[in-house]
Amino acid sequence: MATKKIKYLVIGNSAGGIGCVEGIRRVDRKGSIAVVSDEKYHTYSRPLITHLIEGDVDRRGMDFRPRTFYKGHGVEPYLGYRARDLDTDRRSVRLVSTNGGDRHTLRFEKLLIATGGKPFIPPMEGLDLDGVTPMINLDQSVEVKNKLNRVRHAVVLGAGLIGTKTAQALSHQVEKVTMVELADRILSPVTDSVSSNMAADAFRRNGVQVLLGNTVTEIRGDSKGRVSEVLLKDGTLLPCELFVVAIGVRPRTEILEGTEVVLANMKIGGGVDVDINMRTNLEGIYACGDCAHAHDFITGGMRLLPLWPNAYIGGRIAGMNMAGSTYQHRWATNMNSVDFFGFPMVSAGFMLKPDKKGFEEITRRESVRYSKVILKDDVIQGLIMAGDVDRAGIYLGLMREKVKTTSFKNELLTDEFAVVHLPLEVKEKIKKPIMEIE
Amino acid sequence: MKRIYAVEEVCIGCHLCEIYCQVEHSGSRNIIKTFKDEVPPPSRITVEEEGPVSFALQCRHCPEPYCAYACIAGAIYQDEQTGEIIQDSDKCVGCWTCVLSCTKGAVRADTRGPRKAAKCDLCPGREIPACVEMCPNDALRIVDEEF
């Protein structure tokens, strides 16, 4: 078994891992880098797995970076290897090929844990049936795509970001799609009730059945071991040839079991406990993305934010810091952007006005368009734009910079709102390029 | 790299830069056909006005491009040679994460066909971008600077 010394070891080949490589190379052109992933593929855009099913993106279109990426960045890729036996004292990890046989031991100076998430699947009868799957990686989307010809009716459990995107994709491919959600509205973490209803209407208009306040309690199969129907909590039976479980993801931290790296309490979802520089409690070991916590610039606290931009920027900042910089990751909050059947929707920060002193809410509502800001002492802390998302980023900038909107609060959601109305120093800053990570 | 700067003092708010940006990014690149026969593309430059103050704003080609960092498709990247921030429409899936991430409001939505983000591309193939060339009062200047 070969032992090899590497300066930077990156476990994870998705947004966080790639961000880390690019961050390291901003600072250190030469130090050796190894990227490890148990998926055997060139880095791909995980949020596009549902687009592969929908058919608007092909396999090559899923490449997150050009195929020359690893070579061009001086990276030794170990793709299709599972990392295990992490020894944080000896600074070593064992890599075992996922198709058996091949093993390596890597010794490292700096380590990034960017292992992402794993699907949360509640115990349920029938999970092992053919045609039952989570939807968080390429293999799962390819498998679903290959089975579409025998699917007439698909059921998606969970109407969060993955569930809704899966339902949208399937609606273009199969006869009937039903989305089942336990909450009283779809996309509850990233909407309020008005915007959620507008999104749900977009689904219904496009033939997707939306069932709220309900869940699947049992999966039933046919004699060939294939899923044939699911039983709902209210007793309804839904025939289906495909059942996607998309309730949520949990941090994937198995690699850290038995090490001294501190994890956050399971009451707040677990995940690697990091500081604002993406450092864990152990010198030289960093974490980012879905497996770790991040600083929320709205709440000021650390929390799980399993979102692509948070993973990439967290990884990039971790990478620069692993190479000697001291940047802070101040770009994370609950921040989402989606488009359902041509109905665009973005949101950031608080979705619902906290029931505390100093908070207020301004809304604007038209038939196909809705916007809302939540203010705390005239500083924007929540944003929803549905139906029209033009220039949404200006609001996000005001949120990040904690700009007092007192002098232009009444114009915030009008058509006239623009950079020109902002206080002089804010306006001048917006007109200039962003030269440094802030 | 090339970067466009607006000179607020001499901008007369005529919006011609927006018009010529649309023409340049239209199918025909002909002003009459663009507005008569086609659905005009969104302008990638925006003239903002308040009383006598006006200026044009477009992608600043930030050396720290949060739009690129946020892109879920790997469709936005910095060109290593020129420093420009390139948006690859073929890779774009129209999720609008860049629209939310650009704090300058400089990424727009092109909803003419398959939904795509659209931002200033400094007019590839032209020595001087259309907005700069057509500005009647020299309120847009192209500057070559380090990146």
Image (cartoon, grey):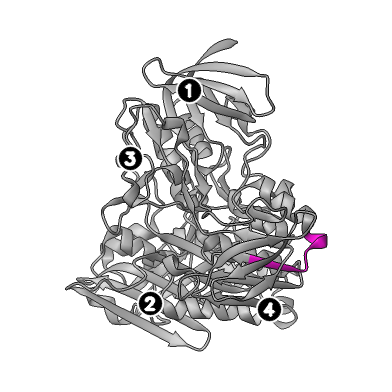
Q: Residues within 10 Å of mark 2 (few under 14, many from 20)?
A: many
**Residue, disc 3:** A273
Specify the segment rendered in magenta.
Answer: A148-155
Image: B68 above or below A109: below
Which circle marks residue A372 in the picture?
A: 2
- SS for tag 2? strand
Which callout, 3 or 4, points at the residue further toward the start of the chain? 4
Which callout, 1 or 2, points at the residue further toward the start of the chain? 1
Q: Residues within 10 Å of mark 3 (few under 14, many from 20)?
A: many
- SS for tag 1? strand
| Amino acid carrying mark 4 in the image | Gly
Q: Residues within 10 Å of mark 1 (few under 14, many from 20)?
A: some
**Residue A219 horizontal/vertical position (percent):** 64, 61
Q: Is B52 or A87 nearer to us in this picture?
A: A87
Image: A315 above or below A306: above
Q: Does residue B122 show up?
A: yes
**Residue, disc 4:** A207
**Residue, disc 1:** A85
Q: Is A85 or A428 nearer to us in this picture?
A: A85
**Residue A270 horizontal/vertical position (percent):** 37, 45
- SS for tag 3? loop
| Amino acid carrying mark 1 in the image | Asp
Question: Whole-Å distance between the Cαs marked 1 and 2?
Answer: 49 Å
* Chain hosting mark 4: A
Q: Are marks 3 and 4 on the same chain?
A: yes
Name the residue at 65% across, 29% down: A98
Extreme residue in the front direction: A223
Name the residue at 52% across, 70% down: A181
- SS for tag 4? loop
